[in-house]
Amino acid sequence: MKTRSFDRFSFQPVISHIIKELGFYQPTAIQLQAIPAIMDGKSVIGQSHTGSGKTHAYLLPLFNQMHTKQQEIQFVITAPTRELAMQIHDKAKQMIQLAGKTHQWSVKLVIGGMDRQKMMHKLKNPPHMIIGTPGRLLDLVKEGVISIFSATAFVIDEADLMADLGLINEIDQLLVRSHPDIQILAFSATIPQQLEHFYKKYLSEPIHFKLDDNVLPETMEHKLIPRRHRPISTIVTQISKAINPYLALVFTNGKKQADELAAKLTQNGLKTGLLHGGLKPRERKRTLKDIQNLRFQYVVATDLAARGIDIEGVSHVINAQMPMKEDFYIHRVGRTARAGMKGTAISLYDETEDKRLIEKLEQKGLTFQFYDVKNGEWKVIRSPKRRKYMAQNRHQEARKRVRKRKAIKIKPGYKKKMNR
């Protein structure tokens, strides 16, 4: 019989029951480090990528220390996007149901796109835990609908994305309205300079842990396909004939590119969904539901829209455009090959524009295989380095032959004899 190593955390029986019902046996690396620190009341900065188990790393200890008799906001959880906030809320509601505490534990979601009057009515009785986007939470605090001064812990999920989207100012204003001794739990894949200043302002001697999960699983293969001035949709359609994905995430670098590619792939007969920040809340919600119901085999997405959202069953990641930074490549392809499963990352690249990025990824330990795809079949091709090496060798051999010919000694009068 398996030993549940979550026992080391000395959770209350109800939390242990939740863990059992969730089917968790072994804590993930981030849970091993974060849970004890959070239970000790320490502020933490955790660096970890999507899929590492960080949501339960803070939800489990927070629920463990919830005081049901105190009808006030005890925990604030912020997320940069509506989708991520909804996902966290779904997990929290699931834990409440598994615990059989639907009438004792209260959690509320506050995001844009919700009926404002209904939301304000539901918040007349303060929930124990409130989950939402920074802008909407700040509006409600400023209007006096809710007070977060009673909160003992404040979670900042996907903090680097908060910085990218310019939401750190809203987080700053929320913390100004919080208790000075509030426990701050910040989770981030990277720590840009903007976050360093923010952390210094609010976190006094936090526990900082960084998981070395940049190195992707060995069960993942990385294929590179040269663009060679061909339309992206044509290459992706050819790829679709060579693979049979359970679900493939297709990444672009912008909303316009995502719109165009999704339309063309649909036109080419592929079951394609679309996910980016430009969609209306109702459209994004419907897309996520359709993904869960396996309506699509391909989902075209942007980095910001897909960031932090846990999409299950991704067998392939296709980079229709290579990202600008290596961290974004890690984010994207890290959505496949989870839990020991195999996964494939296929990237279309420009030999000039993407050369430096590929070199940086190779320095991180990634090994790329170079392919082309024609008529639905993979064709192994030489890497640009190999082609350059071969060309240099041919050039050197040619120069050697020229030098050798020049070095041949010609006897006196040889040309005259040949002329005769």
Image (cartoon, grey):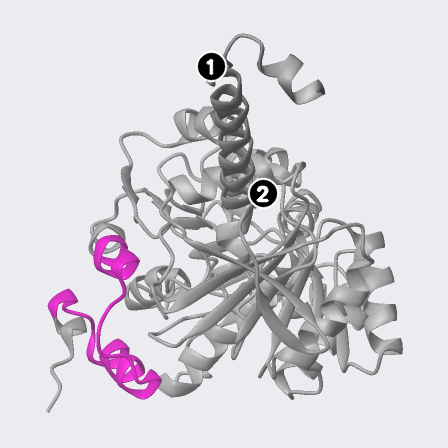
Residue 145: in sight, yes or no?
Answer: no
Q: Secondary structure at mark 2?
A: helix
Q: Which residues are magenta?
A: 8-35
Q: Position of residue 292 (x, y in %)?
A: 62, 83
In the rendered structure, the answer to whether residue 321 lies left or right of residue 11 reads right
The quarter of the rendered structure image containing the C terminus is: top right
Q: For this view, does 108 lie left or right of residue 268?
A: left
Label of residue 409 in the image: 1
User: Is 30 covered by the magenta stretch?
Assistant: yes
In percent of width and height, residue 144 lies at 66, 48
Residue 71, horizontal then vertical, whole percent? 45, 65
Amino acid tagged 2: Met
Q: Residue at the location (65% across, 42% down)? A: 351
At label 1, the amino acid type is Lys
What secondary structure predominates along the stretch shown in magenta? helix
Q: Check disc 1 and report its element: helix, strand or loop.
A: loop
Quadrant of the frame with the N terminus: bottom left
Q: Please rate how many residues cluster around mark 1, counting C-alpha atoms within 10 Å: few if below 14, some from 14 to 19, many from 20.
A: few
Compared with 169, 414 (above or below) is: above
Identify which residue is drawn at 49% across, 77% down.
93
- Asked whether 299 or 184 is in front, the reply is 299
Q: Is residue 58 left or right of residue 272?
A: left
User: Which label is found at residue 289?
Assistant: none
* Front residue of this view, candidates 109 and 66: 109
Q: Earlier in the sequence, mark 2 or mark 1?
A: 2
Is 361 within the magenta?
no
Q: 379 or 260, which is in the foreground?
A: 379
Q: Is residue 149 above or below residue 9?
A: above
Q: Which residue is mark 2?
A: 162
Residue shown at 27% from the left, 76% from the top: 15
Viewer can see residue 80: yes
Numbered disc in front, either 2 or 1: 1
